[in-house]
Amino acid sequence: MLSLYNTLTRKKEPFIPLNPEKTGLYVCGMTVYDYCHLGHARVMVVFDMVSRWLRELGYKLEYVRNITDIDDKIIARANEKNISIQELTQYFIQAMHDDAAALGVLPPDHEPRATDYIDQMITMISDIIAHGKGYAAANGDVYYAVREFPAYGQLSGKSLDDLRAGERVEVDSYKRDPLDFVLWKAAKPQEPAWDSPWGKGRPGWHIECSAMSRALLGPTFDIHGGGADLQFPHHENEIAQSCGAEGHGLSCDQAEELLESHVKYWLHNGFIRVDNEKMSKSLGNFFTIREVLQQYDAEVVRFFILRAHYRSPLNYSDVHLNDAKNALNRLYTALRDTPAANITIKAELNDYTRRFYQAMNDDFGTVEAVAVLFELANEVNKTHDPLLAGCLKGLAGLLGLLQRVPETFLKGTVSDTQGLSTEAIEAMIEQRQQARQAKNWPESDRIRDELLAAGIILEDSAQGTQWRRE
Ligand SMILES: [Zn+2]
């Protein structure tokens, strides 16, 4: 039986789905104003692993990962580049899909975009106000009244007073309480705006997830995931909104019950650090996924992420990545030397499968699961048993690993220095194609030059673009 660590209760709990016919998983997705970075890679790969495992166990999963396609940063970036918001977001949504595909991340069942759910957000804000938990302020914004929701702080384990002490009091604020947060922002000149009962404006960020999860999974669902950095305030606010809109949360005594009426299990993946420091643009140690994929094969990056436990902090460095690469080489070498038989993987197949399933069922214990893969590889190297090799390939496949032709992987689709993986090259060619279609010649030239610098030569013809290595 699967057990998972619930951030809300701070303990491991057996996983019992609310509805056997539909297991809901909602994960906070990306704000599409720039390329995805390593932190995004971790969220995508971790919850890809989680969704694969839930499906392997037979749960009828519905996996939702949203896209934030309207936000201050998006508006600012589109203005800066002098393009429309739609052009900007479409470009980065495509880039995100390319990165995800390169990393072996399967598409979620639903990928709702915030701007397609404005009506549902307006309905939800109206419901929140009707239950006395929201108010329209004099400046035209609508805020959530945090003091009307006694359970606020349960997820992050803090009381309202603790949280309040950490807030700066804004001098000319229209909020009743410093912790109140915006549900609807009054329109500013030159910004996209939608009609609402409170005048023209646009939704706040937090309401998006509450409205989209309610629309696609219902007011109550099984698992909500995201990066640990989203626990406060984003997830705390989601709980307040989702419960508040249903009219729950009337007294402190009901706090626990009321939280059960929204999301049953909260899962958070740990941070990524770079060379043991926080990854940040100002420290100059900030990497996008495509920068990393210029140096390392995408499967190496996936393996690097999955061989750590999803809740542990993960340290990115060349030493760690090279180590991951060598380790993955060892697994592929075993499969090259002993071709894998095609077998059906079951938990009860043998001792290795039993231990692998046990590890994964213990809060997605990929560290132990990967250790089982190495023991299997050692045994395959000793015995050259195709059934054991099939077992290795089959188990690794449950993590989205080891499914390539071993020779291809071992020849190195990526050179040891700065070659690009085939997936990354094709993703970049696709980007360039889009730039050409949009007659964005500087971008198209930039991509061609970037590829050339990496030793990739493009040849355009009427049939499309061919490429070869220098
Ligand atoms: Zn969210």
Image (spheres, rainbow, N blue to C red):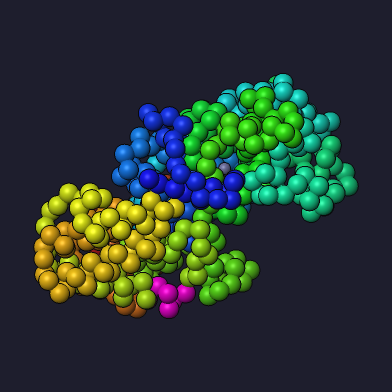
Residue 253 shown left or right of residue 414 in the figure? right
- The residue sitting at 22% across, 61% down in the picture is 392
Residue 444 shown left or right of residue 165 in the figure? left
Q: Quadrant of the C terminus?
A: bottom left
Q: Quadrant of residue 457?
A: bottom left
Give the quarter the ligand 1 occupies: top right
Q: Is residue 94 above or below residue 446?
A: above
Would you say residue 320 sits in the magenta stretch? yes
Give the extent of the magenta segment.
317-322
Residue 301 at x, y percent in the picture: 38, 65
Would you say residue 247 sits in the magenta stretch? no
Residue 143 at x, y percent in the picture: 75, 34
**Residue 171 visible in the current orientation:** yes
Residue 358 at x, y percent in the picture: 34, 54
- The residue sitting at 72% across, 33% down in the picture is 253
- The residue sitting at 64% across, 46% down in the picture is 155
Number of numbered discs visible in the structure rendering: 0
Q: Nearer the viewer, residue 296 or 51?
A: 51
Residue 354 at x, y percent in the picture: 27, 55
